[in-house]
Image (cartoon, grey):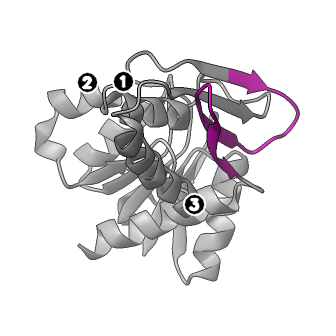
Amino acid sequence: MKIALIGYGKMGHIIEQLSLQRGHQIVYIADVDSEKGNWDEAEVAIEFSTPATAQANVERALRAGKKVVCGTTGWDVEGFKQNHPEYNGQWIWKSNFSIGVNVLFELNKTLAQYLSPYPQYQPAIEEIHHIHKLDKPSGTAKTLAEEIEDNHHPHIPITSIREGEIPGTHTITWDSPEDTIIIQHIAKGRQGFALGAIIAAEELTNH
């Protein structure tokens, strides 16, 4: 697989390392003020940039006929999908590509469904990230809240904390007068996010 990396921060560097370990090629790299390599040679673009630049990056790649995996949060993804249905099936966006977090998403939906008949349980979300994260609350926290809201629990409170270099911790708490239920995902680094994005690119390219 020949990959274009759009965004070459900490996440981009890890994606590069893991891609090479999995036998792929990085043929193009674009960062804030620089680019190198052969854009035309790339089969798929993996995009981790900023909310201000993500849409233009995604659109450029799709117009060039490339598959796209985008992990940037904080931009109008749904609006872009609605305005550009012609690109359906050509790109994937997720608020979080980590395998563990996607398991958390499924657990979160299932728990919300089970507790929906019991109004004494009130849900709340807390997310903790490093001080460099631009969007607040995180895209992952928003996804978790939307999944709960879809099961008749409107207006989920989200507490967002930014401190140190924490990769990402998401905690969903269901509190009642009788007891408390908690599910949580703690990222140990960025490797899980990067690996999930590469696996998504492999799937997208192969199908």
Residue type at the position of mark 3: Gly
**Quadrant where the C terminus lies?**
bottom left
Residue type at the position of mark 2: Gly
Residue 98 shown left or right of residue 127 in the figure: left
Give the foreground label among 2 and 3: 3
Q: Which residue lies furthest to the front in this view?
A: 178
Q: Does the magenta stretch include residue 173?
A: yes
Circle 1 residues within 10 Å: few <14, some 14–19, many ≥20: few
Tag 1 secondary structure: loop
The boundaries of the magenta stretch are: 160-186
The residue under the point 59% across, 23% down is 137
Query: Could you tell which of marks 1 and 3 lies nearer the N-terminus?
Result: 1
Check contact, mark 2 vs mark 1: CB within 8 A: yes
Which residue has dot 1 on it? 76
Tag 3 secondary structure: helix
Query: Could you tell which of marks 2 and 3 lies nearer the N-terminus?
Result: 2
Q: Which of 61 and 199 is in front in this view?
A: 199
Q: Vertical placement of 145 versus 37: above or below?
A: above
Residue type at the position of mark 1: Asp
Q: Which residue lies furthest to the bottom in this view?
A: 23
Which residue has dot 2 on it? 79
Q: Nearer the viewer, residue 143 or 120?
A: 120
Which residue has dot 3 on it? 100
Circle 2 residues within 10 Å: few <14, some 14–19, many ≥20: few
The residue under the point 11% across, 43% down is 86
Q: Vertical placement of 10 versus 22: above or below?
A: above
**Quadrant where the N terminus lies?**
bottom left
Inter-mark Cα distance, 2 to 3: 27 Å
